[in-house]
Amino acid sequence: MPGPLTERPGVFSAPVVGRLLAVFLPVALLAGGIVFLLCYQDRANEESLHEQAGIYMVDLHSNIIAREVETVESDLLYLAGQIALRHYLAGGAGAQDEIQEEYLLFCKKRAVYDQIRYIDADGKERVRINFNNARPAIVAESDLQPKADRYYFVEAMRLARGEVFVSPFDLNVEHGEIEQPLKPTIRFATPVFDALGTKRGVLVLNYLGEALLRKLAEVSHTFPGTMLLLNRDGYFLRGSTPEREWGFMLGHNQTFATDHPAVWASMTAQVKGQCQTSDGLFTFEALALNRAGSDAAVGDSGVIVVAHTPPDVLEARSGQLARRLVLLYGVLVFALLPLAWYLAYIGSQRKAHERQLEESEGRLRSLSTQLITAQEEERRGISRDLHDELGQVVTSVTLDLQRAAQAGDAAKKDEMIGRGLRGASCLLDRIHEISTRVRPPMLDDLGLKDAVQSLLSDFEQRTAIVPKADLRFEHEAVPAAVSAGVYRILQEALTNVSRHAETSEVFVSLHVASGRVALTVRDAGVGFDALALDGKRLGVLGMRERAELLGGIFTLKAAPGKGTEIHAVIPVADSVA
């Protein structure tokens, strides 16, 4: 019997408190360090993501602007080289109507040019198409204006063939007044030459800047900060609000330079870069729109693309994660304290429990010894039964043979020999019956498939119940233990059918495939109530135990008047032959 347990420590005894501190403090410090590292790493990762997002958006805006400028320059040079324009410059009949219709169609199709103009060498407009808010029209000759004093005309007249002047990005001016509503415009101009190579004037495209600003806005909606577009003096061409834009033409001095002087100083010192201040993260790149005769990064017609990520955006996610982690840490520490106390308390009882476990192991060893003794007793009983049963038959045969040897009468001798032979035959039958009951020899000699076929044939001859079999073997090699188990389950199931089912046929399915053996035995007999099953009477308990000992599963379906079905699935790969 187990001895008495050692005295259990108190809930707040010194050993418990000592173990509590040893468990709780290291875990709490480790969790705090992990929270700090996670917050620090997440903040660094978040800053890196915002930096990459700013660089990506600035590059994207710069590429859009560059592609748009290249497209407009391509259109301008295409129009300047048209045969219709040369015909017009040569004074051909009907040439002016032809060139006006050509420009009118081009303006309508492209829908990004507010004006298409040809200005002669004296600065007088000769051909002009106005877009008129998507209703292009040819401007009457009486409405054509002199442009000799306009800077874009003067600059374009200085260029060689194939060069393009690009004006600063500003608002369109008509008759000395800023056009209303505001119309952002970039003017592209190139000199025009006749067939003799004489410079005859300038071709001008007034590009609708709103088209460019709209494209930039479309790709900016996913950016968490603000995308800005500045001119070379820091005035907003595209600002955080419309009221801050075009200050250099509308007479207000709201500029990026006054808002962020430190960042502006960095921007004027380099073409492309990134800096962070208390106002947030700024990513920028300066672009030169007018590349004709200028190597300056920005120049008079230059723009600066700026991506501004404010501090609240920079810190939003990392701050939120930090708050959550701190809250989680508090909950963890609060939950850890009773857990640590519990661990400390049960740890102090471990020695007493170890002694109890040692005593339990002793009792288990004793039980194992008793089980082995019971098995030996059972074997001795089987041996005694075999000896007594078969010994009587052998003794009877021996006596008959002895009497036959002593008999003088031939008829008597023959009778004794006949009786001996019948006894010997009975002995062989009993030996065969006992051997078959212990293990069918056909399983070892022919395998599971042939053994099952033989069993079904014998069953039909003995009971007149017709078995309908579906035997499918993808391979014949089935481990001996599995073969024996399946055979016994089928044997017991057929016995139950013959005794209880009251049916004339039974369905048997045996499939060996995919690393398993699946056996189904189904009849349409009287059935029974499975809930009130007497497992010992019907042998169901034995069938279930055989299947489960082999690592398989066993199921039974039955209902009064609806027959019975047993199904067993046993793995082959996991079985031991």
Image (cartoon, grey):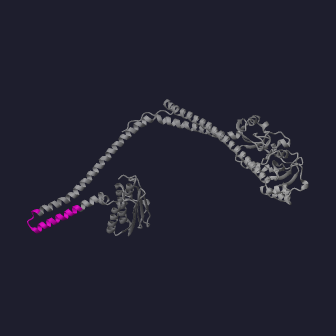
Residue 201 visible, this orientation: no
| Residue 151 drawn at (x, y percent) | 85, 44
Residue sitting farthest toward the front: 196
* Left or right of residue 395: residue 213: right
Quadrant location of the N terminus in the rendered image: top left
| Residue 143 drawn at (x, y percent) | 90, 54
Q: Looking at the magenta stretch, what is its main secondary structure? A: helix
**Range shown magenta:** 405-428
- Rendered image quadrant of residue 52: top right
| Residue 271 drawn at (x, y percent) | 73, 38
Does the segment drawn in magenta span residue 415? yes
Q: Nearer the viewer, residue 111 or 281?
A: 111
* Left or right of residue 532: residue 334: right
Residue 377 visible, this orientation: yes
Q: Nearer the viewer, residue 39 or 330?
A: 39
- Rendered image quadrant of residue 554: bottom left
Q: Nearer the viewer, residue 436 or 356?
A: 436
| Residue 131 drawn at (x, y percent) | 83, 55
